Amino acid sequence: LKHIQDKVIKNLSGGQKQIVEIAKSMLHEPSILLFDEPTVGLDVEVRNNIWEIIRNISKEKDKTILITSHYLEEIEELCEKVVILDKGKVILNREISSLKSGKNKEVSVRFKQKIDKGQLEKQVGKEVTERNGVYTIFIENSKELSKVLSVISSYDVEKIVYGKNLEEIYLRIIGGEY
């Protein structure tokens, strides 16, 4: 916040205002934080900065954080557990990792350091997609999975998820398929 400390709040950008709000929420050292749509209306770069701030609060300050969001990518990225409400009723309350087990076909990874996507593709022998710092590799069988996990384990991994994305799972749950 040092770069904006002398600015009037009403003159700040939406992302800067949101970061100030997060800082204000930490002033009294709460044990639980509630963030309601923390990145709504923000551009990708600011959203990723706020995600990083929330991750750091969770890890370094050992805080419980509750996030309400319609952005399932955000929930998937920041949360360990998901509660899905439909018409005011809880229809799901589970660990995200347990939702993703079973017949899944992709590995998604966030590395702690910058990764050369082309180099990673050469190492795994598969196409790799990258979105917002998350690298995804489609897996067709257990042999490919083993090779991909072996390659990935040679890097400093922040988070790895094997399975479908939360949005796809959500649509199946709401549709009654899950």
Image: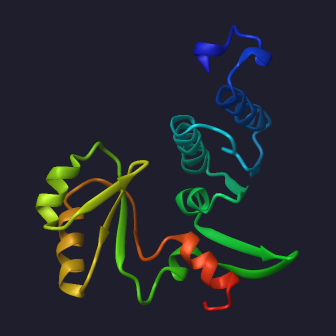
Query: Residue sitting at 61 percent across and 90 percent down?
Result: 178
86 vs 57: above or below: below
x and y percentages locating residue 86 in the rendered image: 80, 77
Q: What residue lies at 11% left-to-right and 59% top-to-bottom?
A: 122
Question: Residue 54, how many percent across, how many down?
Answer: 60, 45
Pick the quarter of the image with the N terminus.
top right
Q: Residue at x 54, y 44 (%)?
A: 56
Count of marks, rendered view: 0
Residue that extends furthest to the right in the rendered view of this protein: 88
Does 142 appear above or below 14?
A: below
The foreground one among 92 and 153 is 92
Q: Nearer the viewer, residue 52 or 57?
A: 52
Horizontal relation, residue 5 to residue 138: left or right: right
Residue 153 visible? The answer is no
Residue 67, given in percent of the width and then of the height, sits at 71, 56
| Residue 94 visible, this orientation | yes
Q: Is residue 147 left or right of residue 115?
A: left
Indicate the position of residue 144 as horizontal and vertical percent values.
19, 79
Farthest-out residue, top: 6
